[in-house]
Image (tube, rainbow, N blue to C red):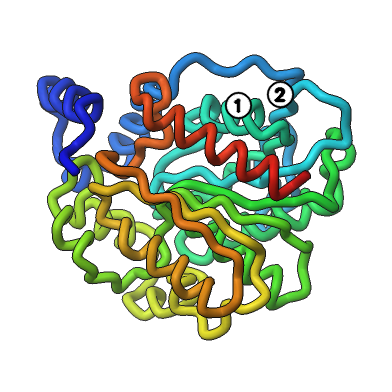
Amino acid sequence: MPLDPQIEALLAQMAEQGAKAPESMTVAENRAMIDDLAGLAGPPAELARVEDTSAPGPDGEIPVRVYVPPGDGPLPVLVYYHGGGWVIGNLDSHDALCRALAARAGCLVAAVDYRLAPEHRFPAAVDDAYAALTWAAEKIGDHGGDPARLAVGGDSAGGNLAAVVAQLAKKQGGPPIAFQLLVYPATDRFDDSPSMRENALGPLLSRAWIEWFLGCYLNSPDDGLDPRVSPGRAEDLSGLPPALVITAEFDPLRDQGAAYVGKLREAGVDAQLLPVDGMIHGFFQMAGVLDKARETLDKAGDALRSALA
């Protein structure tokens, strides 16, 4: 399929603004850019309450924002990790998205502000992500959540972290997880699939930008072999929670997301693939301007509601 007309219009508007290639920008400039893009998510959904709290982490407190939709508790819980290549993004950049998921799924969303690279390289983000999951299993009841109905989710690098913590929880006998929502997740650092080559220049996410992120995040090339960086390279995927993996047609990460679904299924895991035609990496956060983003949010909300019923 061709690029969706709404995506074409958005990309044309961005091109008119003359933005530099992200991989040529500083970390600070990249962080400012993702904050600027947050407005594409549309107006924030009205919820019963939003609370800022924190979870104990390996290097101090981890900020967590809890989104509570209307409804009688205790509510099912989604622990959510924002995208941004482990380098950019924060609670505010993904605020509207987390509100939308809470409202659509009828679940409490706990968004995790894990440590970012290059100030904190791998495995800092993983350690924080797992610590926040453990905190949620122990303490989310204080906020109206039901730790017995616990899901993990995230987009891009956040989808990577969600997949990784699901593997770690199984391996370490950690909190039982009922579901994984993985939105265009990074699952294989060494991916050289057709989608990686076809979309090497973007749109939006390019191969050069991916390498920029990884250069900030990893300590050495060998880190890419670690399943905490490349969860698709884990030897044993059996026993993992059911998953919904969402991919975008014009995304370098499209094929590695689909490949992860295939590997999960081979291991006996109930994994569903939702490919979205005409879309690019990052579209899930653009519900304010993209019809397909709103439709995909609805489907993600339905999947969460069903899995956590």
Q: Is residue 115 left or right of residue 208?
A: right
Q: Amino acid at mark 1?
A: Arg
Q: Is residue 299 left or right of residue 14?
A: right
Q: Amino acid at mark 2?
A: Val
Along the line of sight, which residue is nearer the eye, 156 or 25?
156
Marks 2 and 1, the one that precedes in the sequence? 2
Q: Secondary structure at mark 1?
A: helix
**Quarter of the C terminus within the rendering:** top right
Q: Visible in this render: residue 26?
A: yes
Q: Classify residue 26 by image quadrant.
A: top left
Residue visible at 45% across and 27% down in the picture: 294
Residue visible at 45% across and 56% down in the picture: 273
Residue visible at 49% across and 14% down in the picture: 43
Asked whether disc 2 touches disc 1, contact meaning CB atoms under 8 Å apart, the reply is yes
**Crowdedness of circle 2 by 10 Å Cα count: few (<14), some, many (20+)?**
some
Q: Is residue 52 above or below residue 279?
A: above
Q: Nearer the viewer, mark 2 or mark 1?
A: 1
The residue that mark 1 highlights is 99
Measured from the top left, where is residue 205 in percent x and y? 25, 46
Along the line of sight, which residue is nearer the eye, 219 or 130?
130
Along the line of sight, which residue is nearer the eye, 153 or 255?
255
Q: Secondary structure at mark 2?
A: strand
Measured from the top left, where is residue 269 in percent x and y? 60, 70
Q: Is residue 187 above or below residue 115?
A: below
Q: Classify residue 80 by image quadrant.
A: top right
The residue that mark 2 highlights is 50
User: How far apart are the two marked residues, 2 and 1, measured between alpha carbons?
Assistant: 9 Å
